[in-house]
Amino acid sequence: MYRYNALKSLASLRLTRPIATSIRPLPEKPWNGCSTAYFQTASNSRRPVLRQKGGHSPSTLIGRRNIFIQTENTPNIDALKFLPNHPVLPQGSSIPFLEYLSPRSTLTPPHPSPLAARLMNIDGITAVFYGPEFITVTKAADANWAHVKPEVFSLITEAVTSGEQIVNTVASEKSSTGQKEESQDSLGYDENDDEVVSMIKELLETRIRPAIQEDGGDIEFRGFDNGQVLLKLRGACRTCDSSTVTLKNGIESMLMHYIEEVKGVTQVLDPSEEIALAEFSKFEEKLKAKRTDTSGSAELT
């Protein structure tokens, strides 16, 4: 009888306010292979808090803003793509990307970046690439992501939550200190382009660029000469071992399939990259010569 009366009393109770109306679930992991970081900072959502001694009344509302940062692996094992859910390039800018290849380039005009300067200051980071809504960070081959990645997360989160401008614009002459940019999109419309070049640009823009941006990079159109399409890969694709495969098996085959005037695709190297490639070739030749001498002396003994 006592239990019956107790249950009856509980059933007669009415809640004075709705339950869990302000609770929001954390976002689910969007896909396999994508790691996420979820942060909460001050903003304008409504969530009541209890009054603390000497604090505000219970009706005071403290807002929170959700910062949701994703990371995606790229074909380049030394490059990671970060998506801060926040615009990266300046609003209204015509530049499709920015790439910083040295600490000095992050401080010089025309587009210095405080965030890129701090990222390049991390031991082992060799390049920072800005796409419209993503950041690709490239490390040295001997650096470990387990040590580098948490610090990159922290710096990007701090920059986004503080509201600072990720990229500044300073009127100046074109910089030659390692800052790579396109003042105008090389794939954009140009009334001086002939029909073939216009078709090439349209295919690159609509079919190829989205796939390369998914991999944390971008592509430049450098010209069309004697049937050869001259292209330049940026971001994670710039130092990727599979970039040649991407150019030949992916981009070249598609362009040749749709445009009969295209006979091939050639990757354009910057002067610094040509020097580095030549030095690497010399180093490989020295190693081969050393191996040949070693094997020859072993046979004699």
Image: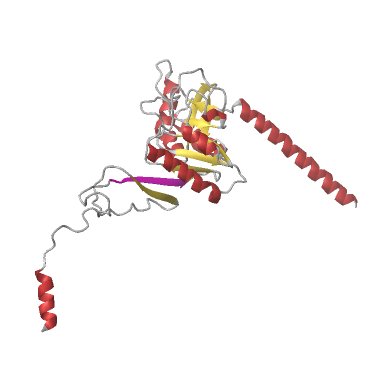
Q: Is residue 71 magenta?
A: yes
Q: Residue 265, image x and y in percent?
A: 54, 30
Q: Is residue 169 left or right of residue 41?
A: right
Q: Nearer the viewer, residue 23 or 231?
A: 23
- The range drawn in magenta is 63-72
Residue 171 higher or lower than 217, as above or below:
above
Q: Residue furthest front?
A: 54
Q: In this rendering, would 75 be left or right of 286?
A: left
Decide which of 126, 58 is in the foreground and name it. 58
Instruction: Pick out the residue farthest to the right.
Output: 301
Residue 235 appears in the picture as rendered: no
Image label count: 0
- Residue that appears at 10% across and 75% down: 8
> Is 167 inside the magenta-drawn segment?
no
Residue at the limit of the structure toward the bottom, as seen here: 1
| 282 left or right of 120 in image | right
Q: Is residue 196 above or below residue 245?
A: above
| Residue located 51% across and 22% down the image | 223
